[in-house]
Image (tube, grey):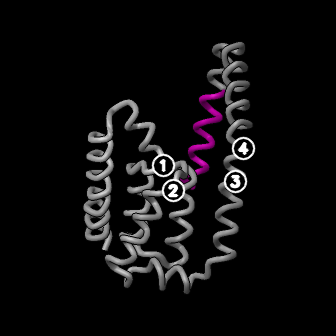
Amino acid sequence: MFEVILYILALTLLSYSFFRDRKKTKMALTKSWKAFINILPALAGVLALIGLMLAVLSPDLVTRVLGQNTGTWGMFLTSLFGAITLIPAFVAYPMAASLLDSGAGIMQIAVFVSTLTMVGTVTAPLEAKYFGWKETLLRNGFAYLFSFVAAIIIGVVLR
């Protein structure tokens, strides 16, 4: 029902914009379409990656490796995976949702998403070029540790 309300609101505001200034509205729709076409390959890749992941990883395997019962070991494993991969956040969130649906623990996925978005192992050389190695290592180290703190807080709150 909420989605229907959002669609009605969007269409109402689009109609208002169209009647107010047709030229600007057409220009905005053209830019939006071009942006959608540019992001479409990445979006298709996300859907393919999630589909492949769900086909390969059984819910039982996900539960055994990343489930709530894996505790610190599962959090450590997902934190390493998150820290060393370079995946855009818009790919990580659907993948995290799929893993949760397959039986992964909330703290394990929270630390995965946190390290993925805050720790830049792959981008560290570029960051160090501008900020220096000391600052880069400090930032990444604190971000890595904070990912665990955030995951524990999320785990306690959502339990």
Name the mark nearer the viewer: 2 or 1.
1
Are circles 4 and 1 on residues that touch, CB within 8 Å?
no
Disc 4 marks a residue whose amino acid type is Leu
Give how far across and how far down residue 58 sits, in percent: 61, 82
Mark 2–mark 1 Cα distance, whole angstroms, equals: 7 Å
Give the magenta range: 1-14
Nearer to us in this view, 109 or 31 = 109
Nearer to us in this view, 141 or 12 = 141
Name the mark nearer the viewer: 2 or 3.
2
Sequence-wise, the earlier of marks 3 and 4 is 4
Residue that badge 3 annotates: 45
Mark 3–mark 4 Cα distance, whole angstroms, equals: 8 Å
Nearer to us in this view, 51 or 23 = 51
Disc 3 marks a residue whose amino acid type is Gly
Q: Residue at x 41, y 75 (%)?
A: 105
Q: Quadrant of the C terminus?
A: bottom left
Residue that badge 2 annotates: 85
Residue that badge 4 annotates: 40
SS at circle 1:
loop
Name the mark nearer the viewer: 4 or 1.
1
Give how far across and how far down residue 128 sits, in percent: 37, 37
Sequence-wise, the earlier of marks 4 and 1 is 4
